[in-house]
Each structure stands twice: as structure tokens, then as C-alpha cells.
Image (cartoon, grey):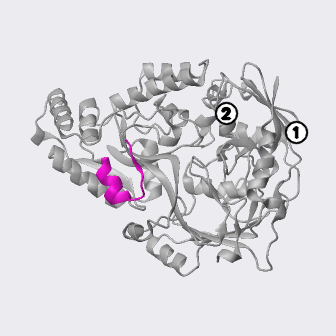
Amino acid sequence: MKKFLLLLALPSLLVLTGCATFRPGTHKNRLRINFVHDPPTLDPRKSGDAYSSNIQYMLYEGLTYFTPDSSQAVPGIAEHIDISTDKCTYTFYLKETHWSDGSEVTAYDFVDTWKEILSPNFPSPDVHLFYVIKNAEMVKKGKKGMEALGVKALDERTIEVRLSKPTPYFLELTAFPCYFPVKRETVEDNPQWAETVNKDFITNGPFRLVKWRHGHEYLLEKNPHYWNARCVQLDEIDISLVDCETTALQMFQNNELDILGSSLSELPFDSIPTFKETLEKHSIAASTFCFFNVREYPFTNENIRKAFMYATNRQQIVENITQLEESPATNILAPVLRRTIEAHFSDQNHQLASEHFKMGLEELGITKEQFPITTLNYFISGINRQLAQELQYQWKSVLGIDVRLDALNIKVFVSKLSKRDFEFTLCPAIAQYNDPMNILERFKRPANPKNYSGWKNARYSELLNKSTYASSDEERFNLLGEAEAILVDECPLFGIYHWNYSYLKQPNVQGLYVSHIGSIHFNYTHFDDEKN
């Protein structure tokens, strides 16, 4: 075994945040933010959306966590980590850390949480992130017993994890909410523990939940039992739930909110030009795509799908709709995930759009007049309505066809995605760890709940498998690049734009950070009254 001294990254982190020298003022340090959607769940085992993840990063912590300076995973609850020479066995040695009720966090809390997620009947939308663990997928499908799972607690503070093959991004996974622990006694005694504030709502992160009015407000306070509590400078985080973006903007302008933007509460579309120069912007591993259901006519046809792809003017969209200096998506992977800068296809190309549309019609045996009116689904949030209308207009202009728009609330939209109850849809894909594989592996199997298209390709899957055994980063990324090219060529989805995480903050708010996967963290956030 070789010692993986991630702990060495921590001293520079302390210098960066200045936590040791912070002197709080006499007033209470309360950060005020807003969510436009009520997070579907506060249980990290069950979340699969950005709103739930946002609050779970405040309430919980995993074996590793993201640093402000590099977004790399460094030890959180883990003290240090050993990795075997074949890179298939990880041994985590835990710090002495505590739950918000003062009891000790143990290796058994992690192991029992993961086993619960992998039990066949447990609903977890991100369970596929565990499939790098030996026998995890077979256990989830009920084909092997839990004793075959490559996870065990060696003692109260030691966890051994055996992977099915080398996984370069495994430590990144352990920083994601689905890998966070829940207190095992709590789960056993009260299955509804995460549905309201109660004595069993026990967490291990920088903050703890003290007030929750469903549909209105969350109030979090600093967790005094958090292992790094001395660096947490906020006393409270007040999260309002206002679903009107215009009202949220007015609250910010009236100094009733400290931060506004991106995954918290987006700016109203019409206000973007006003604040464009003052917005903080971070390129993140997130993109907006058009997903086709490849099992639904007429999108069973590859050329029809490509016609829509080439009929889309991405440059027009980022200049006039999103307006936040995003990158037009002429590939699948966002810039922060890419190791090359080549585009896989050109932006809007009328000739190619017409050629593919003609070939598709011939293959389907129909005329242009017989082409059905298709329905594009999207969820009601931010600029999605304007984006959907612009796409509808572009496709009508280039292809001469009508597309119906169907605006859905977030719960109905997610339900339709999971059931593949759609023809094609406007949908984001946000990376859950900082590696190209997180986006690409979603399309490895049709059964993956995030493979909304239901697409598969044997060569594509083979390339992803080979990449895990690559002898160098260069070889690995070349294999992943070849896989991405297949995904673009067969077009079960196509990119529209790659995101910038953009937000407004009051001048005195300092020390928040946004990771490469778009998660926002307040561990080191504080107020500088001199900049008020």
C-alpha cells in the first residue's frame, strides 16, 4: 500500500481562508440566500438534483471535500488515505469527528449508509456512482448478496473499499452528497427523520438545521461539533423559498438577500443586461442539452436527430438569450472537463441540416408534409422559456417544421425524464465529479437513470472500459475523446451551451467558492464590514 497524503493540501487551504485569524463582530453573521425551488429531499442518499445538493453540502460532509483553490478532493472526515499499488483498494482512516448531537461519526455510519443505497429496493437516483465498487451493481440488482460488496468497516475509524477496476476519479466521488453518511441509529429508529426538523435530524457538516417551514424557509446555524468549526465564520444561513425570480431580485436590491444567481435563484431574463458587468462568473462542468428519446418516432432516426442539431444556432443563443459569456456547445464535454479544444461539429449549418433532414425523411418513408408535430419538454425556470421559444423558431426557419412546447414544473419534468415519457427535451447535465467520465459514463448503459435518451453503442462502452486501464493520462483522454466523437456522431443528444456559474453578491460577502461541478460552498464565507 502507498500512503496518499492528501492532508498536505490543508495548510495552504487555511492560509487561503484565513480562518485562524478571523474575529467575528458583535452582530450575528447571518447569510441570506433564496431557492426558487424547494429541495425535493434533505436525505443525501436520495438526492439527484442541484437544489438538494446545495443544502446537503451545508449540512453534511463526506470522506473528502472540495477545496476553494483547486476544486480537488482533499480529506474531510478522512484523516488520511492509503491506495494499493494496483489502485483498486482504498483504505480510509477517519478523524475523530462528531455528529451535530455530539456523538461520534464512525466507519459503520458510512458503510451502513452505502449498503442501504445499494439494497435492491432503495430509491437512489445517483446509485450508479457506486458501481465502480466491486460487485456494487450486482448487489443492487439482487444478483449477489450484500456480503459480496467490496466495502467493509475494519474498525470504528477504518473503511476499506475495493474497486472492480482502477478509477482515477474515485476520491472525487466520495466528495459528492450520495457518499455522505447518515447516522445509522437515526435511520433505524425513525425512517421519516429527514422530512421535518426533529431530534433525529442529525448531520455532520459545517451547519445544522434548526428551522424548516415547508415551502417557505430553512434556517441553518453553525454546527459546533463540526471537526473544522473554528474555520466556519457564519453563525447562520437563512434560506428563503421565493419562486418568483423578479421578487428575489427586488429582495437582493433591497439588501434582503446577500447572494443571487445560478443554482440558488436565477436572475430574471430581462435583467441580465443590467447586471452583466457586475456578475461573478465561473466556468463549470455543466451544459444544457437537447436530449432525444431514441425509442420514440421520429427520433429513432439518426439523420433526423442530426438535422435538428445542425439547425441550431448556438452562437445566437449565447449572445441574445443566455448573455453570460457561455461557450456554444459544439461538443459534449464542457471546457473545464476537456483536455483538447477541438470542436466536433460546426455551429448552425443550413446545408447539412437540410441534407440530413432529407435523408431522414427518405429513410422513414415520409414526406416533409407528413413529418409529425413533435413536442419539446422543458422545466419552467430561468431562461428556459426563452430558450425553448428560440429553438422552436430556429427549427421552423431552417427545417420548415412545427414543434410544440410543453412547460413543466420540476417534479413532473423529472418524472417524465426518469420514465422516458417524452419525445425530446431541453435538459441540463451537471457533472457530479470533476472528470470527463461523469458525463460520458451516463451513456454507457441504457439502464442508467441519467441516460435519458436510452441510447447504447458497444464500441462506445468498450472505449470507456479501456480508458480505466490506460497507462497514462494522455492515452486515457484520447480514448475518452474517441468515445465522445461517437456520441456526437450518433446524436442521441446535442449540446446547446456550456454554463458559466454567474451570481451577484453584496460587496461585504467574502470567501464563498464555487467548485468545477457548480456546487457552492459557504464553509469559509464571512462578512467584511469595510466593504459594506
Count neighbours of disc 1 (C-alpha within 10 A) and say few if under 14, some if 14 to 19, many if 20 or more: some
Residue 359 percent location from the top left of the image: 17, 29
Q: Toward the viewer: 126 or 461?
A: 461
Question: What separation in Å lies between label 1 and label 2 (alpha carbons)?
Answer: 20 Å
Task: Give the number of the disc on residue 53.
Answer: none
Q: Which residues are magenta?
A: 314-329
Q: Of the two numbered discs 1 and 2 on the same chain, state the one appearing first in sequence.
A: 1
Q: Quadrant of the N terminus?
A: top right
Q: Residues within 10 Å of mark 2 (few under 14, many from 20)?
A: some
Q: Is residue 101 left or right of residue 482?
A: right
The residue that mark 1 highlights is 157
In the orientation shown, which residue stands out farthest toward the bottom? 254
Pick the quarter of the image with the C terminus.
Answer: bottom right
Q: Residue at x 22, y 47 (%)?
A: 395
Q: Is residue 228 visible?
A: yes
Label 2 is placed on what type of residue?
A: Phe
The residue shown at (37%, 38%) is: 493
Frontmost of labels 1 and 2 is: 2
Q: Residue at x 72, y 36 (%)?
A: 115
Determine if the magenta segment contains residue 138.
no
Q: Position of residue 276 (x, y in %)?
A: 44, 65
Based on the picture, tell me whether residue 316 belongs to the magenta stretch.
yes
| Residue drawn at point x = 20 percent, y = 37 percent | 353
Q: Amino acid at mark 1?
A: Arg
User: Which residue was labeled with disc 2?
Assistant: 170
Q: Nearer the viewer, residue 325 or 187?
A: 325
Identify the secondary structure beneath mark 1. loop
In the rendered picture of this protein, how many numbered marks are placed on residues? 2
Above or below, 187 relative to 221:
above
